[in-house]
Image (cartoon, rainbow, N blue to C red):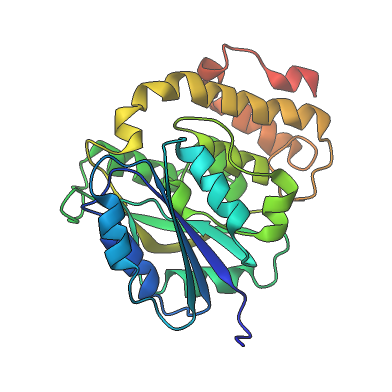
Amino acid sequence: MSSEPLISVVIPSYNHSQYIGQAIDSVFKQTYKNLELIVIDDGSSDNSVQVIKSALRRPPKKCKVQFISRPNKGAHHTINEGLELATGDYLTILNSDDYYHKSRLSILSKKLKKRQPGLVMSYVHHIDTEGKPLSVKHPMREWYQASLSKKLPSVGFRILDSNIAVTTGNLMFTRTLYDKIGGFKDFMLCHDYDFLLRSLFYAEPVLVKKPLINYRSHSANTVTVFAHMATSETPQVAFNYFKECIFNTQPENKMAPCKAYWKKDFEKFWEQSSWIKDWIGGSNPLDFL
């Protein structure tokens, strides 16, 4: 029996037959060996199911595998279903069109060993449909680099400023954190950002400054197809965080970006974040704190 904590990886699959094999393979090739892989196909209309079955034929010795194929229920439902089935000490997700660096789970798991509850993420490597690095002038790369270069007092503030995790698949968290905040909510585009912001009240995220996940930008991924949803979802998610600051006056995470622990920094952040004011219609939650 392995002395290492069990890591459960959930892959929600939907119409990514050309990428899902590489995603699964990147889990099987991890240097970390005590793994559980749960793949749920969410009613794909392409040949994803056949590709998945083929990819799962020869899992590594210490990797438990479970595969479910069923009608479409949506991304957040599929992720939550997988997390409920997971038995690991640490939980993580991998979108079916992305893939891991071979040392990702080993590096991230070490950061969680002394953190209960805990959450960790890494830098992101942005790739195109063929797996080639995006140009440094690509809008996604420019936004990402600009977000990382901002001078902010903590990782929590950096996340509040922008979703530097980029993707649900960049989050690894302890079961204790998942049990505290629950699953992913019913957002088409921002379920990862909502989960991140809710986690800030319980755990200060760790950011590993190495690109350990390959995030694919292409015309068929959810971010591209439903980009228009950001204009309605992101303001709601941001406002929910500030509203929670009103009632949760002493978060468990003593580094949480809120007025209770960062009075001057929090007020300064608000004053300098004109985009947040625009998002939530100019209302200032600090008036109620």
Choose top left, top right, bottom left or bottom right for residue 89.
bottom right
- Whether residue 31 is visible here, answered yes or no, is yes
Q: In this orientation, which residue lies closer to the viewer: 262 or 166?
A: 166
Residue sitting at x 73%, y 22%: 286
Residue sitting at x 67%, y 38%: 265
Residue sitting at x 67%, y 17%: 284
Q: In this orientation, which residue lies closer to the viewer: 5 or 77?
A: 77
- Whether residue 201 is visible here, answered yes or no, is no
Q: In this orientation, which residue lies closer to the viewer: 250 or 10?
A: 10
Task: Examine the rendered structure and indicate whether residue 208 appears above or below residue 198.
Answer: below
Relative to 111, 128 lies left or right: left
User: Which residue reaches farthest bottom?
Assistant: 1
Task: Examine the rendered structure and indicate whether residue 76 appears above or below residue 108.
Answer: above
Name the quarter where the N terminus is drawn.
bottom right
Residue sitting at x 58%, y 50%: 155
Task: Examine the rendered structure and indicate whether residue 50 appears above or below residue 188.
Answer: below
Relative to 99, 252 lies left or right: right
Name the quarter where the C terminus is drawn.
top right
Relative to 56, 288 lies left or right: right
Q: Pinpoint residue 107: horizontal percent, then vertical percent.
A: 49, 73
Q: Pinpoint residue 186: horizontal percent, then vertical percent.
A: 55, 31
Q: Pinpoint residue 164: horizontal percent, then vertical percent.
A: 46, 45
